[in-house]
């Protein structure tokens, strides 16, 4: 099965499952509270297949870009009959519970999936937990320009004291072209400054150009790519590239993007011996579906791998989902303020590429972890205060609660129309960005 087909199948299964879980949340609470559900639909547009059970039509529609649960009297533009089973006949707190149930199910699913993954395979780069000691500074990078040196320990960045490398990486990623105040400890001195991460990759994420010391060790080889062809084997430690030391995988990736398809001399250490290989990088898919100039191996730098007990797994899952939620909300805020490019957002094409890459990794845990991340994203996105989305419904219910009366139907109609146009334009822009990034990734 080729990578395009794998990506297509993976994204259809993942998004279909996410939509099913989300809509089931609305459906279950509506039924529980006595609201008549007329349709439970996956997709929009014309009905393709389905069945009717009781008062509900369960259907699969032609346009697979979401789903919905249609309840009697839900649309404020519909004529109200006063039937106690209509959505708008129910008290606001009933409507609030129905609206929040969909996002809640997605967030709950993210927690459950990540808990399951951690009970089977809990793995992360060992250096991410370490103090942020700089092992290498890319020449000409923002960090180099403000005087950061190898050996400096980052003791503060953007208000976070004594950060780990994971915290530093998140701050960089979310702040391209934005100044970040920082302080480093150099010997016995504290040196303060401000660094402006440069936008990198087609997603225009931020990078300051400072890296930890992280041995580059060859892991799994990609069949048919240069590393395998020249005789590099798993376990080889990459020592240098064209005579320059390689302190981390990020440094190697950046240097290969600079040399492009020109042959490079790779020195490796194997069983106490030094071996040299002349290798020509090729443009090939990397992690997250992006095309980079690569030699064709996965990094196997030291990682921490274990299985967590159920209490430990759920504790870590809750903590990680909370942290990711904060990052997502911070990203949304920066998008609104135009401090982050919309290119950082992935649409259906980008999600398909990521799903395809995860599906081709060994085991089920990478795909389940990605599914958890997508589910969390979907839950948070639906809680944003955009009318016609769940968060918008909750916002309007809150306003009506403060007013102690319903917003007039003509005003609601205009709000929903404007929100619909906004969402269509936003979706079109995200898909356009996906296509533009995909094309850019494949250009030399």
Image: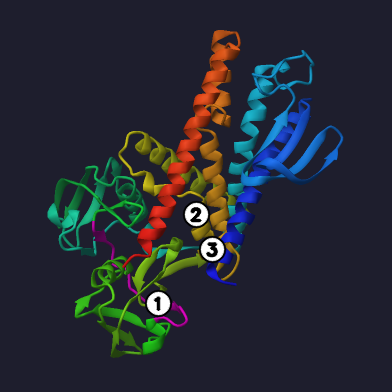
The residue range painted magenta reads: 209-225
Q: In the image, what residue occupies the spot 55% across and 36% down?
A: 382
Crowding at dot 1, Cα within 10 Å, few <14 / some 14-19 / many 20+, comes out as many
Q: Is residue 33 left or right of residue 237?
A: right
Of the numbered discs 3 and 2, the one sitting upstream in the chain is 2
Q: What residue is disc 2 on? A: 349
State the image quarter where residue 65 is shown.
Answer: top right
Q: Secondary structure at mark 3?
A: helix
Identify which residue, 179 or 430, lies in the foreground. Answer: 430
Of the numbered discs 1 and 3, the one sitting upstream in the chain is 1
Residue 219: in magenta span = yes
Residue farthest toward the front in the current orientation of the protein: 46
Residue farthest toward the top in the current orientation of the protein: 404
x then y, percent, for residue 373? 53, 50
Q: What residue is disc 1 on? A: 296
Q: What residue is disc 3 on? A: 356
Q: Secondary structure at mark 1?
A: loop
Q: In the image, what residue occupies the spot 24% across and 73% down?
A: 259
Q: In the image, what residue occupies the spot 30% across and 50% down?
A: 172
Pair 3/2: label in front: 2
């Amino acid at each position: 099965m080729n990578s395009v087909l794998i990506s297509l199948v993976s994204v259809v299964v993942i998004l279909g499952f996410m939509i099913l879980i989300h809509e089931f949340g609305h459906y279950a609470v509506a039924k529980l509270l006595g609201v008549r559900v007329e349709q439970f639909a996956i997709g929009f547009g014309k009905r393709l297949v389905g069945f009717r059970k009781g008062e509900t039509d369960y259907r699969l529609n032609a346009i697979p870009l979401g789903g919905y649960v249609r309840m009697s009297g839900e649309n404020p533009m519909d004529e109200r009959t006063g039937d106690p089973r209509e959505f708008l006949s129910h008290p606001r707190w009933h409507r609030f519970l129905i609206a929040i149930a969909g996002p809640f199910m997605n967030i709950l699913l993210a927690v459950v999936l990540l808990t399951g993954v951690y009970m089977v395979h809990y793995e992360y780069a060992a250096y991410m937990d370490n103090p942020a000691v700089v092992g290498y500074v890319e020449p000409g990078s923002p960090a180099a320009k403000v005087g950061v040196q190898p050996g400096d320990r980052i003791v503060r960045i953007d208000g976070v004291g004594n950060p780990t490398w994971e915290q530093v990486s998140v701050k960089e990623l979310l702040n391209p072209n934005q100044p970040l105040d920082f302080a480093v400890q150099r010997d016995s001195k504290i040196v303060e400054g401000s660094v402006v991460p440069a936008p990198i990759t087609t997603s225009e994420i931020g990078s300051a150009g400072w890296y930890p010391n992280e041995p580059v060790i060859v892991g799994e080889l990609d069949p048919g790519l240069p590393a395998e062809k020249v005789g590099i084997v798993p376990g080889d430690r990459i020592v240098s590239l064209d005579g320059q030391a390689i302190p981390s995988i990020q440094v190697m990736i950046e240097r290969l993007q600079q040399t492009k398809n020109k042959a490079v001399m790779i020195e490796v250490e194997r069983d106490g011996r030094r071996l040299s290989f002349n290798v020509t990088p090729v443009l090939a898919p990397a992690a997250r579906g992006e095309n980079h100039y690569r030699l064709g191996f996965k990094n196997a730098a030291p990682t921490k791998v274990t299985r967590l007990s159920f209490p430990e797994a759920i504790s870590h899952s809750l903590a990680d989902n909370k942290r990711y939620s904060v990052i997502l909300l911070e990203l949304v805020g920066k998008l609104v303020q135009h401090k982050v490019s919309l290119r950082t957002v992935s649409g259906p094409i980008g999600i398909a590429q990521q799903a395809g890459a995860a599906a081709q990794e060994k085991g089920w845990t990478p795909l389940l972890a990605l599914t958890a991340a997508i589910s969390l994203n979907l839950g948070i996105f639906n809680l944003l205060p955009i009318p016609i989305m769940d968060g918008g419904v909750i916002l309007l219910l809150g306003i009506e609660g403060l007013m102690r009366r319903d917003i007039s139907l003509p005003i609601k109609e205009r709000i929903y129309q404007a929100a619909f146009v906004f969402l269509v334009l936003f979706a079109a822009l995200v898909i356009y960005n996906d296509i533009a990034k995909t094309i850019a990734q494949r250009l030399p």
